[in-house]
Amino acid sequence: MCLYVFCDGDKEQYEALKPSAQSLGAAFQKVNFLRDVKADYQQLNRTYFPEVDFGNFTPDIKRAIEQDIQEDFAKAYQGIVKLPVKARFGVYVAYKYYLSLFRKIKRAQPASLLSNRISIPNYSKAFILMRAGLRSQLNIL
C-alpha cells in the first residue's frame, strides 16, 4: 500500500518494485503468524498455514515454512535497495526487525512456538535501529 507513495506516483518504478514489496509483506505476515501461533491456534482456533496440522508440528514442517519465508525475505531485500532514498530507511528498519524476529523463531523448537510468544527485547530493537541508521547514512544497505 505504501509503495505507490514511496515512489511519488512513478508508475514504472512502482511496477518494478511491486513484486519485492509483495514479498516483504508476505514475509512480515508469515513471521507474525509463526510468532502468534500459540494464541491463534490454541486460543482462537485459527491457523494461517492451512496445510499445517499444528497438533503435529514437526521440525520438517517448520523448516518448510521457514524456507518459504527466507525466499520472501531475499526477494524483498532486492527491492529495498532500489527504493527511493527517502523511503528506504524506514522500510529497512522494519525489514531488519522482522528478520531478527524470524532468526529467533528459526532457533526455536516447534513445540516452543506453541507454548511461548517469541519477541525481540527492547535493547535489541534499539540496536537494530542504530545499526540500520548507520548503514543508511553510509549508504551500505
Image: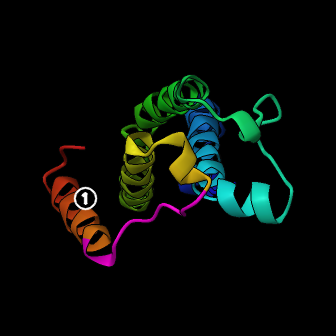
- Please tell me whether the stretch drawn in magenta is mainly helix, strand or loop: loop
Asked which quadrant contains residue 72, the reply is top right
Q: Residues within 10 Å of mark 1 (few under 14, many from 20)?
A: many
State the scheme by which the image is colored. Answer: rainbow
Residue 7 seen from this side: no
Q: Amino acid at mark 1?
A: Ala
Q: What element does badge 1 sit on?
A: helix
Q: Is residue 136 magenta?
A: no
Front-most of 11 and 60?
60
Outermost residue toward the right in this view: 45
Q: Which residue is under mark 1?
A: 132
Give the x, y percent position of residue 108. 43, 46
Quadrant of the rendering where the N terminus is positioned:
bottom right
Say above or below: 137 vs 54: below
Say above or below: 126 vs 73: below
User: Residue at (25%, 75%) from the top-left corner?
Assistant: 123
| Residue segment shown in magenta | 115-123
User: Residue at (42%, 40%) from the top-left corner?
Assistant: 106
